[in-house]
Image: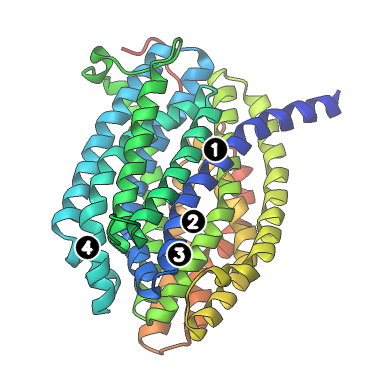
C-alpha cells in the first residue's frame, strides 16, 4: 500500500512539476537566445542588455508577488470547487497587473538613461542599454496580463497549454532576433534594439494566445461583472499572502540587482562573464522552480479540502524530492558548464571569470533547490510566506551584500572573491529550513465560505 501511495504521489507531483519546469526552461531560453545572439555581436551588447533587463526583473518581482498571492488562493479555492471566487481572483490579478506594468513602463520609457547609470558607469553600456530600455518597455504592458492567465493555467490542469505557448514564443523570438539583430536582405541590422523589438512581438503573441485559450468551453475567464467587482475579504486575504511574498521577493530580487550593479562596476569583462553565468544558471534553476510550483499547487489543493494530515505527509515527501532535485541541478551544471563559453565572443579574462563562476555555482545550485522548493512552494501554499523575507534579510542583506560591497569598493578584493561572497546567501539559508518546516506554520486552510 505504501509503495502504491508513493507512486501516486510521485506521478501527481511530476505531472505538475515537469510541465512547469519545461515552461520555465522555455521562458529562460528566450533570454538565453537573446544573450547568445548578442554575445556573437559584442560583449558590450550582451552586458548592456543584461543590465538593462534588471528593470523588467524588478517589475517581475512585483508581478510575481501579487500573482503568487492570488495563485495561493486560486489553488485552494479551485481545490474546493469554488469557480466563482476563482474568476473574481483572476480579475483582481489583472487589475493589479495593469497598475504595476504602467508604473514600470513609465520609468523605463522616460528614465532609461538614469536607470542604466544605476547599474554601470561605462558610457558604452549606458548608451546601448538606454536605447534598448526605451523600446522594450512596451512589452511590459502585455507581460503582466499574460502572467495572470498563465497562473490560472497552472492550477486548472492546462500546464501543457502554457508549455506550448512558451515553446512557440521561443521559436518566434529566435527567428525575429536573427533578422532584427543581424539584419537580412532589406531588414536593417538593429543590434541590441532588435532584441527589444523581438521581445515586444513575443509578449504580444503570448498575451493573445492566453486570452483566446481562456474562452475555450468550460474554462474560467474574467467577465464585466468580475472585472469591476471588489471583495474586501478577498483583497485582504490576497494582501495577507502577497505582502510577505513581496517582502521576500523584493529582498531577494533587489539583491540580484545589487549583484549586477557591483559586478557592473568591476569592469566589462566581469559584467560579461556574470551575464553569461546567469544565463546558464537560469536554465538549470527551472527544474527547482518547476517542483516549487508543482508542490505549491498540490499542497494548496489538499489544504483547500482541509486534509491537513495528508498535506503534512506530502511535505515530508517533498523534502526528499528537494534533495534529489539539488543533486540534479549540480550534475547538470557540471555537464553544460564547460561548454558555455564556446558560444560567446569573450575576451580571455572574461572567459576565465566565467569558468570560475560556473564552478562555484555547482554548490550554490544544490542549496538553491531546497530554498526554492520550500520558501516558494511549500511554505506559501499554506500562508507562511513571511519566512522567505526573513531568511533573505538576514543571509543576504545583513551578511552577503554588506561584506561584498566593502570588499569590492573599500578593500578592492579580486572579482572572484567578491562574487563568491555575494552568492553565499543561498548556502547560508539552507540549514535553517528544517526548524521552520517542523513548526508547521504552513499547514493552514485559507479558504472562506460564501465570499461576496
Disc nearer the start of the sequence (4/3): 4
Q: Residues within 10 Å of mark 2 (few under 14, many from 20)?
A: many
Q: Where is residue 358? Give x, y as percent.
A: 59, 70
Disc nearer the start of the sequence (1/2): 1
Work out how far the residue at label 2 is from the one at label 3, CA to CA, in angstroms: 8 Å
What residue is at 64 percent from the left and 71 percent from the top? 338
Q: Residues within 10 Å of mark 4 (few under 14, many from 20)?
A: some
Assess whether mark 3 and mark 2 are in contact (beta carbons under 8 angstroms).
Answer: no
Residue linked to disc 1: 293
Work out how far the residue at label 1 is from the one at label 3, CA to CA, in angstroms: 23 Å
Disc 1 element: helix
Nearer mark to the viewer, of 1 and 3:
1
Tell which residue pokes out farthest to the left in this image. 110
Nearer mark to the viewer, of 4 and 2:
4
Q: Quadrant of residue 310?
A: top right
Assess whether mark 3 and mark 4 are in contact (beta carbons under 8 angstroms).
Answer: no
Disc nearer the start of the sequence (1/3): 1
Q: Residues within 10 Å of mark 1 (few under 14, many from 20)?
A: many
Assess whether mark 1 and mark 4 are in contact (beta carbons under 8 angstroms).
Answer: no
What residue is at 46 percent from the left and 10 percent from the top? 218
Q: Quadrant of the N terminus?
A: top right
Nearer mark to the viewer, of 1 and 2:
1
Mark identifier at residue 391:
2
Work out how far the residue at label 4 is from the one at label 1, CA to CA, in angstroms: 35 Å
Residue 39 drawn above or below residue 387: below
Residue linked to disc 4: 131
Q: Quadrant of residue 242?
A: top left
Disc 3 element: helix
Disc nearer the start of the sequence (4/2): 4
Is residue 62 shown to the viewer in this render?
yes
Mark identifier at residue 396:
3
Q: Nearer the viewer, residue 276 or 446?
A: 276
Amino acid at each position: 500500500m505504501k509503495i502504491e501511495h508513493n507512486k501516486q504521489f510521485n506521478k501527481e507531483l511530476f505531472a505538475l512539476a515537469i510541465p512547469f519546469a519545461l515552461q520555465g526552461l522555455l521562458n529562460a531560453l528566450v533570454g538565453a537566445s537573446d544573450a547568445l545572439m548578442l554575445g556573437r555581436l559584442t560583449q558590450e551588447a550582451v552586458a548592456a542588455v543584461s543590465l538593462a533587463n534588471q528593470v523588467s526583473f524588478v517589475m517581475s518581482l512585483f508581478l510575481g508577488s501579487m500573482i503568487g498571492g492570488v495563485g495561493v488562493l486560486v489553488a485552494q479555492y479551485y481545490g474546493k470547487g469554488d469557480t466563482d471566487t476563482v474568476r473574481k481572483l483572476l480579475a483582481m490579478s489583472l487589475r493589479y497587473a495593469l497598475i504595476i506594468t504602467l508604473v514600470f513602463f513609465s520609468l523605463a520609457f522616460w528614465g532609461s538613461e538614469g536607470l542604466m547609470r544605476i547599474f554601470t558607469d561605462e558610457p558604452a553600456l549606458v548608451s546601448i542599454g538606454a536605447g534598448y530600455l526605451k523600446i522594450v518597455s512596451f512589452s511590459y504592458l502585455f507581460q503582466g496580463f499574460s502572467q495572470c492567465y498563465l497562473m490560472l493555467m497552472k492550477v486548472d490542469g492546462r500546464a501543457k497549454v502554457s508549455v506550448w505557448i512558451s515553446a512557440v514564443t521561443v521559436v518566434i523570438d529566435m527567428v525575429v532576433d536573427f533578422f532584427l539583430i543581424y539584419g537580412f536582405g532589406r531588414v536593417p541590422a538593429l543590434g541590441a534594439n532588435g532584441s527589444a523589438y523581438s521581445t515586444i512581438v513575443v509578449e504580444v503573441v503570448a498575451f493573445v494566445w492566453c486570452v483566446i485559450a481562456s474562452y475555450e468551453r468550460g474554462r474560467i475567464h474574467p467577465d464585466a461583472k468580475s472585472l469591476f467587482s471588489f471583495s474586501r475579504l478577498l483583497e485582504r486575504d490576497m494582501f495577507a499572502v502577497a505582502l510577505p511574498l513581496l517582502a521576500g521577493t523584493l529582498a531577494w530580487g533587489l539583491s540580484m540587482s545589487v549583484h549586477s550593479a557591483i559586478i557592473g562596476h568591476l569592469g566589462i569583462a566581469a559584467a560579461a562573464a556574470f551575464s553569461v553565468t546567469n544565463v546558464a544558471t537560469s536554465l538549470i534553476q527551472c527544474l527547482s522552480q518547476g517542483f516549487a510550483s508543482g508542490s505549491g499547487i498540490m499542497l494548496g489543493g489538499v489544504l483547500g479540502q482541509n486534509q491537513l494530515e495528508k498535506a503534512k505527509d506530502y511535505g515530508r515527501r517533498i523534502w526528499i524530492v528537494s534533495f534529489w532535485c539539488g543533486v540534479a541541478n549540480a550534475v547538470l551544471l557540471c555537464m553544460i558548464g564547460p561548454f558555455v563559453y564556446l558560444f560567446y565572443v569573450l575576451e580571455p579574462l572574461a572567459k576565465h571569470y566565467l569558468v570560475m563562476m560556473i564552478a562555484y555555482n555547482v554548490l550554490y545550485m544544490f542549496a538553491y533547490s531546497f530554498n526554492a522548493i520550500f520558501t516558494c512552494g511549500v511554505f506559501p501554499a499554506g500562508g507562511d510566506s513571511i519566512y522567505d523575507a526573513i531568511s533573505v534579510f538576514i543571509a543576504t542583506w545583513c551578511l552577503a551584500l554588506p561584506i561584498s560591497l566593502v570588499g569590492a569598493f573599500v578593500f578592492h578584493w579580486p572579482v572572484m572573491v567578491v562574487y563568491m561572497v555575494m552568492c553565499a546567501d543561498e548556502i547560508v539559508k539552507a540549514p535553517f529550513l528544517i526548524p521552520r518546516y517542523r513548526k508547521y506554520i504552513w499547514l493552514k486552510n485559507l479558504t472562506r465560505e460564501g465570499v461576496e
